[in-house]
Image: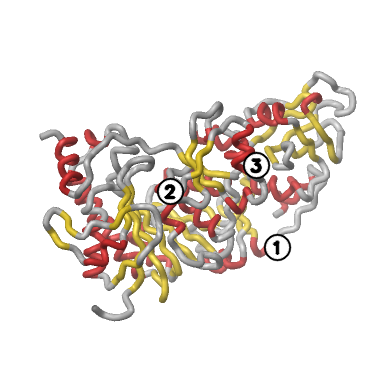
Amino acid sequence: MKQLAMFASQFGAKITLNPELVVEKAQRYYFLNATLKKLARGDFYSAGLYLGKVKNGVFFPSFNLLDMLVDLAANKVVLDRKTAWLFICGRDVFRTGILRVCGSKRKGAATLVLNEFGECLGFGRITGSLDEAEGRVVVRNILDVGDFLRRER
Amino acid sequence: MSSREFFVNRYAQLGWNFRVAEARQAIRINQTNAKSKNLPERLRSIGVQLEKAPFLESGYWVGKSKVSAGATAEYLLGLYSIQEAAAQIPATLFTALRGKTVLDACAAPGGKTVELSDLMGNTGSVVALDVNKMRLAALSNQLERCHVSNAVVYNLDARQASRLSLKFDRILLDVPCSGNFASDKLWFNRRTLKDAERNAQLQREILSEALKCLAPNGEIVYSTCSLEPEEDELNMDWAVKNLNLQIEKVNCHGEKGLTEVFGQKLDASVERCKRIWPENTQGFFVCKLTKRTVQP
């Protein structure tokens, strides 16, 4: 739970999940509904909503967790269609591709990356001033939904 | 006689004249995630050509498209799944899925698990089993991509499902099978009748085990993508005669199940099964079973 809270706080978000419904197994976190909690045995492979894993002391979020943060997070950038496509191909974001910014514009802050429909494509870290950095990378891609395709390779 | 001639001859004996067929790529809209997003229009706007599959509520065939349907943002966001059209049928045959405890006994790679969860609106619970641990990674990826929150996955052989000590209201048995030529170009070179017979035995074992886990008033949907009657009608005839199961009428795409196979007369109720010969879809077989309440 601490790992989840720390991760969420990077975005200026406070996540409140019932700790009784969060299950850790092999350093992977799952959020179960009450029915699943009663029914799931300890030897499951996965259960409920996968939230993320800790590897070598680093927390790697799932897209389920990022989705949960969309309504909570202060830090968000909304991309235009072309930039959104480039982002899910693993590219960083240039200032010109950003339609809207919410929350922190501070260099080094984590930000969720959304498409024009408000759907979460992943997250990144702000690398330059969002106010004045025309033509430069301003959000470094850390994780994007294209990861689902890369995992299959 | 070549393997191809052997099987083509068998299909002729079953009343179907062989013709080359290839299953068209199809998608299924995940209604839970895509609600009010007008997804077909959104996909058309990015160059994915869709044609509604007339026998499916949420299924579309993919026409010639500018982009791959398996690599759009909408796919990666879990708004739809790539799922062969006939394979979308089994999960839709259950009644009243919401809030139920459901078993998907041979679940990987997870297309039908996601579909079940979608039809349940992420309520109740889906227990997904697969014997092959390597395939569970693909299954878990599907569940994450589609934001499934009501499933628990075990690395367990369907023939050991009763070890979970659970009773299920609905059981999907999309059992391992021999496949068919419409989804595998080399099918005729790969398969023999012995494969079908071996699979048929495995399928009977899975069906017998599933019955132990079925709750009162529960439903089983059995499906294969095999055209071989050993894995289809003959197994259902066996289930009716040996497992005290009855075949329910279903209203879905497909022809009546065969009630006479290579001169052998089967229980008349086997015609309630649905057999789909390949055309726009792959070859498929599906039926719904319940426990018999009155002895014949």
Q: Residue at x 38, y 48 (%)?
A: B132
Q: Which type of secondary structure does the marked residue at label 2 adopt?
A: loop
Q: Give the labeled residue for mark 2.
A: B108
Q: Which type of secondary structure does the marked residue at label 3 adopt?
A: strand
Image position of B180 (left or right of B76): left
**Mark linked to residue A60:** 3
Q: Residue at x 23, y 57 (%)?
A: B258
Image position of B150 (left or right of A79): left
Of callouts 3 and 1, the N-terminal one:
1
Whether callout 2 and callout 1 share a subunit is answered no
Amino acid marked by disc 2: Ala
- Of circles 2 and 1, the one toward us is 2
Amino acid marked by disc 3: Phe
Front-most of A45 and B42? B42
Q: Give the labeled residue for mark 1.
A: A18
Toward the top, the furthest residue is A135
Quarter of the figure with residue B235: bottom left
**Mark linked to residue B201:** none
Residue B162, horizontal then vertical, whole percent: 38, 67
Q: Which residue is drawn at 62% across and 50% down?
A: B33
